[in-house]
Image (cartoon, rainbow, N blue to C red):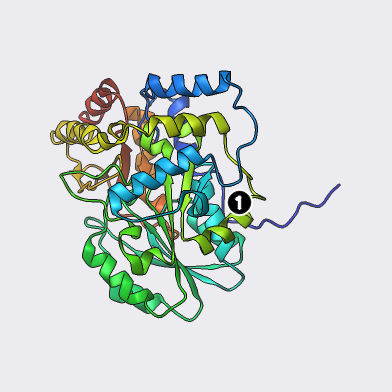
Amino acid sequence: MIQLPKSKLPNVGTTIFSQMTQLANEHRAINLSQGFPDFPADAQLIALADEYMKKGFNQYAPLGGMLPLKERIAEKIENSHQAVYHPETEITITAGGTQAIFTTIATLVKEGDEVIIFEPAYDCYEPTVELFGGKVKRFKMKAPNYEIDWNIVKNLVTEKTKLIILNNPNNPSGKILYDEDMQELIKIVKGTSIFILSDEVYENIVFDEKKHLSICKYPELKERSFLIASFGKLFHITGWKIGYCAAPKALTEEFRKVHQFNVFCVNTPLQLALGDYMKDDSNYLYLSNFFQEKRDFLREGLRQTSFELLDCEGTYFQALKYDKISDKNDFDFAQELTIQHKVATIPFSSFYQDKMNENVIRLCFAKKTETLEKAIENLAKL
């Protein structure tokens, strides 16, 4: 009998997102756990994809991506953040945001390198760092405000620090970064060789007239940063798995060396469809208002319950503190909600390496109004 290989990720199992979605399906619960919309993408975008397939654009795309799409991305970034990236040499189309994150870490991290992350953290960061021999150092953001003490972050930096990973707006907390945060980050990395991976997949979903401050707005940060974004979040097409990485030319050259042996290139007709669709910026500039209406609808409905509504400045996730309802840990409470009350959520402890429990769960409100109405009705019975 063949001997199984030693696991490179011995502590990693099935993600909490898959677990909760499976549990939701088994118990016919409303799935507010996994972050995907239950409403359709724009028919115009689907028609464009169909058109390019029928025109025969069904073979490999160039390594870096289709130029028309990269040109639209460059225009979007410049219009939004007054930062310039060259479409050919500084933007790479990827198979979703997660692949861009994986490739960035693979490009930079070697055995013994240290990587600073901010928890609660998207679950792909730490395992990918570990795959390439890196060591994760964590700053814990805590309920209810999820603020960063940059003095503590500064003390995490050593001569081995290779990378700092940001997620702005943050999934799952919905917290955004402000100018004072960016200024503190500039002080920390000044005079070092530390790189930054800025996961900005929710950049167009920021509420209450607040502004998303991209890493690329700050020249001192842009020169050392890989900016990651996702069309799945932008156009309600998570199943298309298309994103991009924007970085200075020298960094992009290194990124593409890894990218070419990972996926090489990304779906050709869908890239062309997205390039055409982005010519009208109203197709994404409406997003903040669109999702704020959903956020406000959900929050108003839950005010009648004993849940404590934490601030939600961005993303399409709402955090709820439930300590007035139950003394169970968040994983057990999330299971109980799914099985007994037919609403699937995500426990916040899943976003912390040590499974820290603060009695907080995450709901996704990228759902149809009738879905949210039914979820509110169920949760109001607690």
Residue 181 at what x, y percent from top left? 26, 65
Residue 101 at what x, y percent from top left? 50, 53
Q: Quadrant of the C terminus?
A: top left
Taking the spot 43% from the left edge, 29% from the top edge, the residue there is 24
Q: Is residue 129 left or right of residue 155?
A: right
Residue 147 sits above or below residue 286 on the image: below
Residue 215 visible somewhere in the drawing = yes
Residue 376 sits above or below residue 192 on the image: above
Neighbourhood count class around disc 1 (C-alpha, 10 Å): few under 14, some 14–19, many 20 upward: many
Query: Which image quadrant for residue 132?
Result: bottom right
Q: Is residue 259 left or right of residue 356?
A: right
Taking the spot 22% from the left edge, 46% from the top edge, the residue there is 312
**Residue on which disc 1 sits:** 259
Residue toward you, 246 or 112: 246
Query: Which image quadrant for residue 45?
Result: top left
Residue 374 at what x, y percent from top left? 26, 23
Q: How many marks?
A: 1
Residue 108 sits above or below residue 157 on the image: above
Residue toward you, 93 or 194: 93
Query: Which image quadrant for residue 357?
Result: bottom left
Taking the spot 63% from the left edge, 44% from the top edge, the residue there is 263
Residue pushed farthest right? Answer: 1
| Residue type, mark 1 in image | His
Q: Mark 1 falls on what kind of element?
A: helix
Residue toward you, 349 or 229: 229
Residue 369 at what x, y percent from top left? 25, 23
Residue 128 visible somewhere in the drawing = no
